[in-house]
C-alpha cells in the first residue's frame, strides 16, 4: 500500500502528499520517508508534545529522514 502522506523535516507534521509545503511552518521540506506517528490532541497538557516542542494539535512523525 502506498501512503499519500508526507512529513515535514522541520516540524514533523504529517500532511497529504498533494501539498507542496508544510501548512504549519511553511517550509518546502516534505519527505515520504518517515516512521512512527503520534497524534497530539491537547498540546498544553501533553508530556510528549512538550518533549517534541509541539504546540499545535495534529498528527506528527517521530522520525523523518
Image: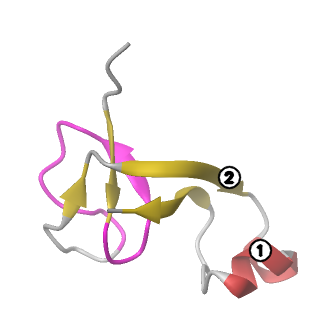
Q: What residue sits 58% from the left and 72% below the top?
A: 56
Q: In which quarter of the image is residue 48?
A: bottom right
Outermost residue, top direction?
1
Separation of residues labelled 1 and 2 (CA atoms):
10 Å
Residue 12 % position (x, y): 44, 66
Q: Mark 1 sits on what residue? A: 48
Q: What residue sits 48% from the left and 63% below the top?
A: 63
Task: Please say whether residue 41 is one of the residues in the magenta stretch.
Answer: no
Task: Please say whether residue 16 is one of the residues in the magenta stretch.
Answer: yes
Residue 54 % position (x, y): 60, 79
| Element on which disc 1 rests | helix
The one of 35 and 29 positioned closer to us in this rendering: 35
Q: What residue sits 13% from the left and 67% below the top?
A: 28
Badge 2: how crowded within 10 Å, few (<14), some, or many (20+)? some
User: Which disc is residue 34 wearing?
Assistant: none
Residue 5 % position (x, y): 34, 38
Quarter of the image where the C terminus is located: bottom left
- Looking at the image, residue 28 sits to the left or right of residue 56; the answer is left
The one of 10 and 16 positioned closer to us in this rendering: 10
Q: Is the magenta stretch mostly helix, strand or loop?
A: loop
Quarter of the image where the N terminus is located: top left
Q: Mark 2 sits on what residue? A: 39
- Over which residues does the magenta segment extend? 9-24
In this figure, what is the number of numbered marks? Answer: 2
User: Which sits earlier in the primary sequence, circle 1 or circle 2?
Assistant: 2
Looking at the image, residue 3 lies above or below residue 35? above
Residue 26 % position (x, y): 22, 74
Q: What residue sits 24% from the left and 54% below the top?
A: 31
The one of 2 and 17 positioned closer to us in this rendering: 2
Looking at the image, residue 54 lies above or below residue 41? below
| Element on which disc 2 rests | strand
Amino acid at each position: 500500500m502506498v501512503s499519500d502522506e508526507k512529513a515535514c523535516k522541520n516540524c514533523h507534521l504529517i500532511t497529504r502528499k498533494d501539498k507542496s509545503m508544510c501548512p504549519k511552518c511553511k517550509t518546502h521540506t516534505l519527505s515520504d520517508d518517515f516512521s512512527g506517528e503520534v497524534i497530539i490532541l491537547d498540546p498544553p497538557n501533553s508530556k510528549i508534545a512538550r518533549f517534541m516542542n509541539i504546540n499545535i494539535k495534529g498528527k506528527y512523525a517521530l522520525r523523518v529522514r
